[in-house]
Image (tube, helix red, strand yellow):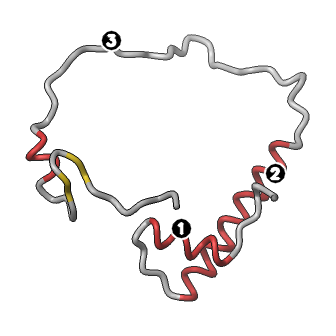
Amino acid sequence: MDPYLITPELVSHIAELAALDLDAEEKAQFFADLNRILDHIKQLRSSNTEDAVEFQPEGSLNPLREDKNMPSFPTSDMLRNAPEKEGDFFKIPPVLE
């Protein structure tokens, strides 16, 4: 199966998983957009990058912050607006069948 194959049925399934209520025109637009994105990815994957050189402007830094233990938000605050919860967890519809 082609990993780059987007079908209208797949768009409907993704919209359902994301709880998006899309009309036919919006689904058609997402279908076109996703296929256009995947076409670009196919082109990039087929590009020869063997002799490519990584470029980083002189003097630029990759600033990383130090990892620190910090207090978290209380679970009750995090779950306050959850549509569904089970104990201390968000309850979501199954993604994999």
29, 12: nearer the viewer: 12
**Mark linked to residue 14:** 1
Query: Dot 1 lies on which element?
Result: helix
Q: Amino acid at mark 3?
A: Glu
Q: Position of residue 35 (x, y in %)?
A: 72, 66
Q: Amino acid at mark 1?
A: Ile
Q: Which residue is mark 3?
A: 66
- Which quadrant of the structure image shows residue 75? top left
The CA distance from mark 3 to mark 1 is 37 Å
Residue at 61% of width from left, 77% of height from top?
Answer: 29
Residue at 50% of width from left, 87% of height from top?
Answer: 23
Q: Is 85 situated left or right of 60 in this image?
A: left
Q: Are marks 3 and 1 in contact (CB under 8 Å)?
A: no
Say whether disc 2 or disc 1 marks the residue closer to the N-terminus.
1
Q: Determine whether 48 is above or below 38 in the image.
A: above
Residue at 86% of width from left, 30% of height from top?
Answer: 49
Disc nearest the viewer among 3 and 1: 1
Say whether disc 2 or disc 3 marks the residue closer to the N-terminus.
2
Q: Amino acid at mark 2?
A: Lys
Disc nearest the viewer among 2 and 1: 1
Query: Dot 2 lies on which element?
Result: helix
Question: Would you call the spot at circle 2 few (<14 residues within 10 Å), some (14-19), or many (20 or more)?
Answer: few
**Mark linked to residue 42:** 2
